[in-house]
């Protein structure tokens, strides 16, 4: 694969092309974001939020819940509307276990890759511990900048990731199955916190009614305006995809009218900015601890010659020095 654009001139040109609908240019720019480094930073500097121009939907759920199958049928439903365009960012878990599934995804998604209304890209989730890769958030902004009005983000929900998805998307869909597993049960409160729409997929399987009762029982404690819709789908047969698309549109209309969307957007920006600063600091702290002068202090603490608080302050002083040095050079 080519290295893609790296000089600022290249980036500007590719961004123009991507904004004019060139999907190859868009794919190359996402690769720039994934690689990180200075080219990525200079691309980021060209991206501004375009208020009110786009919408993001997160789809999360346990491994194998049928998210990709569901998304694929949903894409079909969306582009049936004249003028609709939609981008999908599928966040691959780095686990090798998922390789087979990803191959399956590609085959399923192939039906859509040829249509000009759809842009599909899978992204690695590595690089940001357990969470939604920062590059995914950047890619979402790039898509918005390039005029894509709707972005779907598929992530495997394991623990923290649901919260991550909620802090990066406007409508959150949680996909469950009949007889939802123990890990989902254990995390029920967390899921209820983030879900705007629950989908019980694989509604052709046993245990559907019990799962619905269980879920609705749990949701009854929420105030009516915050109570998520519960839908049933059979993704492999395309059943329920139309109702899901309608539910997404209804949710969007409701949070737009109530002002909740505006609050969510501010929270998203806060979370992304915070994540960026955290990542830079973590990188600096890691480099600090790789330096030799740390070893002497560690030895001194372990031999009782230096106290932990004093050593901590010295380390922070070193960190500030490092920061000041790097901003003046
Ligand atoms: N019976 C039945 N099987 C389904 C349904 N939806 C998906 N499946 C099957 O479930 C398996 C997993 O589907 P995927 O769409 O890959 O699930 P996923 O949630 O994207 O999986 P990961 O991305 O690996 O977490 C596949 O074999 C699908 O064919 C359904 O509604 N009913
Ligand atoms: Mg999948």
Image (spheres, rainbow, N blue to C red):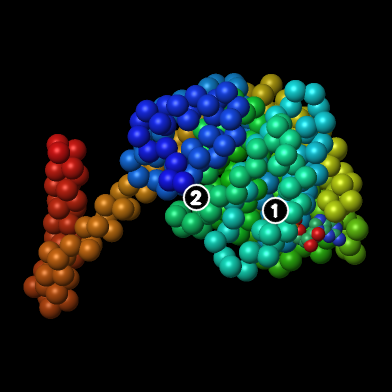
* Percent x, y of residue 95: 57, 65
Residue 297 falls in which quadrant of the image? bottom left
Q: Residues within 10 Å of mark 1 (few under 14, many from 20)?
A: some
* Percent x, y of residue 304: 12, 75
The quadrant where ligand 2 appears is: bottom right
Q: Residues within 10 Å of mark 2 (few under 14, many from 20)?
A: few
Residue most extreme to the front: 2
Q: Verify CB contact (< 8 Å) between mark 1 and mark 2.
A: no
Depicted 319 relative to depicted 149: above or below: below
Residue 256 falls in which quadrant of the image? top right
Q: CA distance from mark 1 to mark 2?
A: 19 Å
* Percent x, y of residue 25: 53, 34
Q: State the residue at coordinates (74%, 66%).
A: 181
Q: Is residue 81 left or right of residue 87?
A: right
Q: State the residue at coordinates (54%, 35%).
A: 26
Near-viewer residue (151 or 259): 151
Q: Helix, strand, or loop for circle 1?
A: helix
Q: State the residue at coordinates (85%, 53%).
A: 236
* Label number found at residue 25: none
Q: State the residue at coordinates (87%, 44%).
A: 240
Establish whether ligand 2 lies closer than 8 Å to the Cβ of label 1.
Answer: no
Residue of label 1: 106
Screen quadrant of the C terminus: top left
Depicted 50 relative to depicted 196: above or below: above
**Residue 260 visible to an observer of this rendering:** no
Q: Helix, strand, or loop for circle 2?
A: loop
* Percent x, y of residue 230: 81, 45
Residue of label 2: 1
Depicted 45 relative to depicted 66: above or below: above
State which tag comes first along the sequence, 1 or 2.
Answer: 2
Near-viewer residue (14 or 243): 14
């Amino acid at each position: 694969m080519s290295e893609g654009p790296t000089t600022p001139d290249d980036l500007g040109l590719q961004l123009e092309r991507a904004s004019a609908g060139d999907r190859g240019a868009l794919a190359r720019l996402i690769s720039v974001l994934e690689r990180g480094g200075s080219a990525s930073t200079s691309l980021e500097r060209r991206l501004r939020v375009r208020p009110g121009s786009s919408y993001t939907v997160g789809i999360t759920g346990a491994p194998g819940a049928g998210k990709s199958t569901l998304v694929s049928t949903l894409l079909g439903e969306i582009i049936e509307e004249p003028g609709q365009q939609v981008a999908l960012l599928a966040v691959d878990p780095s686990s090798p276990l998922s390789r087979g599934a990803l191959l399956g995804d590609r085959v399923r998604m192939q039906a859509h890759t040829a249509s000009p209304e759809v842009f599909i890209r899978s992204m690695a989730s590595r690089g940001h511990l357990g969470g939604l890769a920062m590059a995914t958030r950047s890619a979402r902004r790039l898509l918005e900048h390039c005029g894509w009005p709707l972005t779907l983000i598929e992530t495997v929900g394991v623990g923290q990731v649901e919260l991550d998805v909620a802090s990066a998307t406007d409508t959150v869909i949680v996909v469950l199955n009949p007889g939802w597993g123990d890990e989902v049960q254990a995390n029920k409160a967390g899921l209820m916190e983030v879900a705007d729409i629950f989908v019980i997929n694989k509604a052709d399987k046993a245990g559907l009614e019990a799962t619905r009762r269980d879920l609705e029982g749990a949701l009854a404690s929420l105030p009516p305006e915050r109570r998520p819709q519960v839908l049933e789908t059979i993704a492999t047969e395309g059943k329920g995809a139309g109702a899901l698309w309608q539910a997404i549109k209804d949710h969007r209309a409701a949070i737009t009218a109530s002002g909740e969307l505006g609050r969510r957007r501010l929270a998203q920006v806060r979370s992304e900015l915070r994540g960026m600063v955290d990542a830079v600091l973590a990188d600096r702290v890691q480099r600090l601890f790789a330096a030799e002068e740390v070893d002497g202090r560690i030895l001194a603490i372990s031999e009782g010659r230096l106290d932990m608080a004093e050593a901590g302050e010295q380390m922070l002083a070193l960190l500030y020095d490092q920061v000041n040095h790097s901003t003046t050079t």
